[in-house]
Image (cartoon, rainbow, N blue to C red):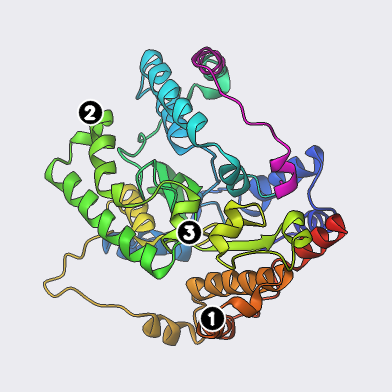
Amino acid sequence: VFSDRARELVEKCERQGGLSQADGEALIREGTTRIFKWTGQARDQGLYQDLSGAGFKIAADIACFESHHLNHLTPNTLCMDLYVAAMKKCLGEMDEEAFEGRASVVLGRLARVADRDWLRLHFRHLSHAEIDAYQASQVTEAEIADIVTALVGTLRGEPFQLQELKHAGFKDFTEGPSEDTPVLLRQDAYRALTEIVRFIGRRGQVILAGHTARFGEIEERFYATTPRGRALYDRCLAEADAMRDRDPGLPRRDPAAYETAYAKPFAAFPKTLPELLRQGLVYGRYAPTPRGVAARGSLATWDIHALVDQGFAQVEGLRYEDFLPVSAAGIFASNLNQYGTRSTAAVRPTYSASQLEAIMGRPIIDAMQVSAAIEARSLLDTWRQLGVIDRVPVAERSALEQAIQAAPVAILPASAAASQQAVASAG
């Protein structure tokens, strides 16, 4: 699939920890104009029609096109709601005044939640020490207004006049948790475009047809949930979806009212990383601080949350790096007019991981087990570095060791480098 030039650039990126602006643009060009370029050339129209007619447009896309192409691309965004508002403005679904109001609200929220934990979650290249060196400050309404004015000016530019293009519009609502609940991920998308496809018949004749499958998706990622956190999320999501089903036109008719109603079921979730960790709803990676290492032998507690609060340990939430099945199904269903989050069968089918493993011929890695092992390893390592490991109850230590052993992949001491740095700083 990948060209020699693409491999060369990827390997260069890995060697030096990133690419220059020129190399980065070269990699994008290699991917979009060569490897995954849309050609609109397909074969076997009969198979294509059979698959599409049965609701399997993605399968038709994969089986019948003659070359790889970008079906959908899912970049990350730092602020989903601001991005969605900007896209709706560019597509002509939101006027300038409405965008200004929405952007002001969203940036005001961002200013309130963008603390050190938020920075660590979204800017992975920043270390704890770099983030701790930043000084907290208040963003004024006037400063937010200036940013909004600059955004409006930018979106007036020619590259953003998407309303002049043929498009199918943006989704009515964002998939995933409410905007104030930092777990798992949120997803949204503009709807798939209808594009001309040239089928080559068996006698070489050209047959023109339409294809509707390629769409643009966006996501914002948050913290990986524990089984307890995922169960709570599923309950909240079911309640929120039921609210929307009672009034499906609310998201488009009154977006603000919909957002408020959608958030109510998620009120059961804490909104900050420390509280999410305390309640065992998300996973964290812990490490000792220089202050903690310097205090080794004199610490009064082994409670990890107290150690973090007192500055003897530090923590970062583990970011969720998987699909969220219901959200993904919602995106595809909204774009392809096919089945998605609900079964229409008389008897609802059931599927299991073991069935999928049998089809693939290999086991599926349990992401929760991996996250649990990372957290467990970091806890044990931190307690050892701080000299309090002997105070931890044997049963708790045993449970953490079992979590490490149960991981489907080897989990190395995650905080070893941080611990060595802390020892060097303290010494």
Upstream in sequence: badge 1 or badge 2: 2
Q: Is residue 202 visible?
A: no
Question: Is-magenta flag for residue 156?
Answer: no
Q: Amino acid at mark 1?
A: Pro
Q: Amino acid at mark 3?
A: Leu
Residue drawn 41% across and 80% down? Answer: 356
Distance (Cα) linking label 3 and label 2:
34 Å
Residue 48, percent from left and from top: 37, 62
Q: Is residue 101 visible?
A: yes
Mark 3 or 1, which is nearer the eye? 1
Badge 2 density bin: few <14, some 14–19, many ≥20, Cα 10 Å: few
Position of 18 relative to 422 (above/below): above
Q: Residue at left 87%, top 59%?
A: 424
**Distance from Cα at disc 3 to Cα at disc 1:** 20 Å
The x and y percentages for residue 113 are 49, 37
Above or below — where is 392 with respect to 191? below
The magenta segment is 125-150
Looking at marks 3 and 2 on the same chain, the residue that comes earlier in the sequence is marked by 2
Q: Which mark is residue 254?
A: 2
On residue 88, the disc is none
Viewer-proximal residue among 374 and 71: 374
Tell me which numbered mark, 3 or 1, is placed earlier along the sequence.
Answer: 3
Q: Secondary structure at mark 1?
A: loop
Residue, disc 1: 393
Q: Quadrant of the N terminus?
A: bottom right
**Helix, strand or loop at mark 3:** helix
- Name the spot of residue 101 as percent of width and height, x first: 38, 18
| Tag 3 residue | 277
